[in-house]
């Protein structure tokens, strides 16, 4: 049974940083596409970053240069480093995984991921 558990969310001031983690079980990071999505109040869930099985990374234009996705295959853990946070980054952040080696060009679509975590909340005050 695949299970994803996020942690690391919290409340920070604008310009601050956080590091989110996603502990995975039931499969191996080295053979899956994994991603981070977020959903703000009243908004649709959107993809912010994804990482292929071979480590290739993909980012939404709105977060390039500020957010970094990475993974540790030995620990079966996915990370999202959030820097220079803005109030518009405040959202529930979700970890997602899917049984494909490449996340592909449509990685930011929610329907392309089969497995989801419960989310971790990020709050940014101005």
Image (cartoon, rainbow, N blue to C red):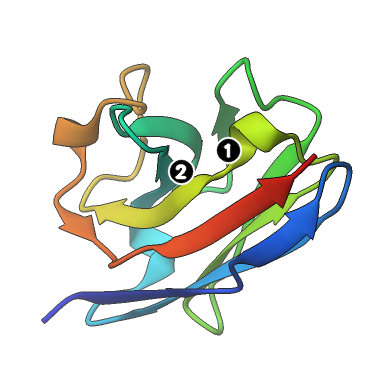
Left/right of residue 107 with respect to residue 89 in the rendered view: left
Camera-side residue: 88 or 107? 88
Q: Position of residue 72 (x, y in %)?
A: 60, 72
Q: Residue at x 85, y 39 (%)?
A: 84
Q: Residue at x 43, y 42 (%)?
A: 38
**Residue ID for mark 1:** 56
- Res 119 → quadrant: bottom left
* Quarter of the image where the C terminus is located: top right
**Residue ID for mark 2:** 52
Mark 2 residue element: loop
Camera-side residue: 2 or 28? 2
Q: Position of residue 70 (x, y in %)?
A: 64, 56
Reply above or below: 56 against 122: above
Reply above or below: 73 against 79: below
Number of the label disc, if any, that sits on residue 17: none
Q: Position of residue 115 (x, y in %)?
A: 19, 58
How many residues crowd mark 1 within 10 Å: few (<14), some (14–19), many (20+)?
Answer: few
Mark 1 residue element: loop
Left/right of residue 86 with respect to residue 116 in the rendered view: right
Left/right of residue 72 with respect to residue 30 in the rendered view: right
Dots 2, 1 in contact, CB < 8 A: yes
* Quarter of the image where the N terminus is located: bottom left
Q: Residue at x 45, y 52 (%)?
A: 93
- Res 23 → quadrant: bottom left
């Amino acid at each position: 049974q695949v299970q994803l558990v996020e942690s690391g969310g919290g409340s920070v001031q604008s310009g601050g940083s956080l590091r989110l983690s996603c502990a995975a079980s039931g499969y191996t990071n080295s053979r899956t596409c994994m991603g981070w999505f977020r959903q703000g109040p009243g908004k649709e869930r959107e993809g912010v970053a994804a990482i292929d099985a071979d480590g290739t990374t993909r980012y939404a234009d709105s977060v390039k240069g500020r957010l970094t996705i990475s993974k540790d295959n030995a620990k079966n853990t996915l990370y999202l480093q959030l820097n220079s946070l803005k109030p518009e980054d405040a959202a529930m952040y979700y970890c997602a995984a899917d049984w494909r080696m490449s996340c592909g060009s449509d990685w930011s679509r929610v329907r392309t991921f089969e497995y989801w975590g419960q989310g971790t909340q990020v709050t940014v005050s101005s």
